[in-house]
Image (cartoon, rainbow, N blue to C red):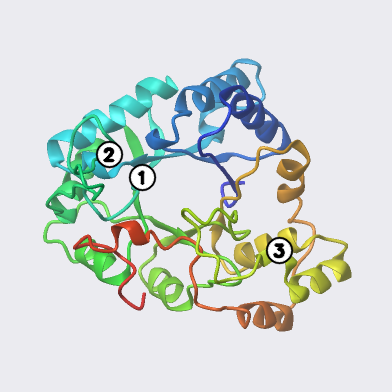
C-alpha cells in the first residue's frame, strides 16, 4: 500500500538490506529514503533482489528520494538526483522531494560549518530549485515532485510561481496524535497536496535532536485504552488515526516483529468519537524542532503553520 511506508535512516547496512526485503514480503510498497541516510545502496539492492525473485515488479514499488540542502542551486539538482539513481541502480524514482526549505553552502560537506561551529548557509531560492526539479521530471528521472518541512508560506511560494509546470504532490512533515497539524493538513487538502507524516509514532528520546517536552506518545492512556478495545497496540492506533484522516504514514523500524506489527492496521477502523478524542490529544509541540537551524532565513517553524 502506498499509503504506508517504511522510513529509513542510518543503521547497520546489512540490517537495512534484510529489513527492506522483509518489508516487501510483509506488503510494504512505499519506501522513504534519502542520500543523507547513507543507505540507498542497500535499499536499492533489496528492491532489485525482490524484483529479480519475482516478488514484485518495479512499478509496484514507490520509492521517495530527497534533495539535500547543499544541492539547492539549480545546476546541482539533477546531479544530486542522478547520484541517488546511480546508488539505487534504478532508472527513476517515484517521488523526489526537497528535504528542507533551507539551502546550505554547496560542497562535499553535507553539514558545512564555520570554525566556530555555526552552520554555513546559502542563498535560498525555492522557486529556482523547483524549476530544476521540474526539468528532472520532464527528463523522466522522477515521476512526481514534492517537498518536506515546508510551511504554508513556502508552499504558496511554489503554488503561485509564474509558469509553474508541476505542482508539489506532497509535503512530508512531522505528524502524530501529539502534533496533528490541523491547519496545514486543511491547507494541503484544499490544494490537492498529500500530507506524509514522519515520526507517526512519536520519536526516539535522543535529546541531541528531539524535543523532550512531550511525554512518550506510545504510553498515552487514551491510545492504550482504544488499543485494548480492538486488540491493537497504541502504535497501531496512532498509525490508524493518521491513515484514516488521509495522512500517509512512514514508520521507521529495524525490528522484524515491529515491521510486521506496523502493517497490521487495515483490519480495524476508529469511530468518529475515537478520532475526535485522539485529535484532542494535540499538544501542538514538535518532537523535531531543528533549532540548530532556527537562524536560517527560511527556517520553516517560526510561522504558526
Cα separation, mark 3 vs mark 1, equals 33 Å
Viewer-proximal residue among 214 and 187: 214
As drawn, which residue projects farthest toward the top? 52
Q: Report whether residue 23 is seen.
A: yes
Question: Residue 158, percent across and down?
Answer: 22, 61
For the C terminus, the quadrant is: bottom left
Viewer-proximal residue among 165 and 50: 50
- Residue 218 — which label? 3
Q: Horizontal placement of 12 versus 88: left or right?
A: right
Cα separation, mark 2 vs mark 1, equals 7 Å
As drawn, which residue projects farthest toward the front? 116
- Residue 144 — which label? 1
| Mark 2, secondary structure of its residue | helix
The quarter holding residue 159 reads bottom left
Residue at the disc numbered 2 = 137
Compared to residue 283, the image places residue 17 above or below, namely: above
Cα separation, mark 2 vs mark 3, equals 39 Å
Residue beneath the point at 66% across and 37% down: 254
| Mark 3, secondary structure of its residue | helix
Residue beneath the point at 47% across and 53% down: 208
Amino acid at each position: 500500500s502506498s499509503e504506508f511506508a517504511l522510513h529509513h535512516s542510518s543503521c547497520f547496512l546489512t540490517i537495512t538490506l534484510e529489513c527492506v526485503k522483509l518489508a516487501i514480503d510483509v506488503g510494504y510498497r512505499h519506501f522513504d529514503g534519502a542520500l543523507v541516510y547513507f543507505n540507498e545502496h542497500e535499499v536499492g539492492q533489496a528492491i532489485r533482489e525482490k524484483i529479480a525473485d519475482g516478488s514484485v515488479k518495479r512499478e509496484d514499488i514507490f520509492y521517495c528520494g530527497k534533495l539535500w540542502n547543499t544541492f539547492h542551486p539549480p545546476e546541482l539538482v539533477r546531479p544530486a538526483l542522478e547520484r541517488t539513481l546511480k546508488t539505487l541502480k534504478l532508472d527513476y524514482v517515484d517521488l523526489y522531494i526537497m528535504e528542507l526549505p533551507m539551502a546550505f553552502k554547496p560542497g562535499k560537506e553535507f553539514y558545512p560549518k564555520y570554525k566556530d561551529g555555526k552552520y554555513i548557509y546559502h542563498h535560498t531560492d525555492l522557486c529556482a530549485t523547483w524549476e530544476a526539479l521540474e526539468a528532472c521530471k520532464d527528463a523522466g528521472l522522477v515521476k512526481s515532485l514534492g517537498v518536506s518541512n515546508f510551511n504554508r508560506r513556502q508552499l504558496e511560494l511554489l503554488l503561485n510561481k509564474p509558469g509553474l509546470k508541476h505542482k508539489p504532490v506532497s509535503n512530508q512533515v512531522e505528524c502524530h496524535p501529539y502534533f496533528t497539524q490541523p491547519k496545514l493538513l486543511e491547507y494541503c487538502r484544499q490544494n490537492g497536496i498529500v500530507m506524509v507524516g514522519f515520526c507517526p509514532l512519536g520519536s526516539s528520546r535522543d535529546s541531541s535532536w528531539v524535543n523532550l517536552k512531550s511525554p512518550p506518545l506510545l504510553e498515552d492512556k487514551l491510545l492504550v485504552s482504544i488499543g485494548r478495545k480492538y486488540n491493537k497496540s497504541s502504535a497501531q492506533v496512532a498509525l490508524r488515526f493518521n491513515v484514516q484522516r488521509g495522512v500517509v504514514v512512514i514508520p521507521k523500524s529495524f525490528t522484524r516483529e515491529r515491521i510486521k506489527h506496523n502493517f497490521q492496521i487495515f483490519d480495524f477502523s476508529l469511530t468518529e468519537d475515537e478520532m475526535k478524542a485522539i485529535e484532542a490529544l494535540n499538544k501542538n509541540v514538535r518532537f523535531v524542532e531543528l533549532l540548530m537551524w532556527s537562524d536560517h532565513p527560511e527556517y520553516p517553524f517560526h510561522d504558526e503553520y
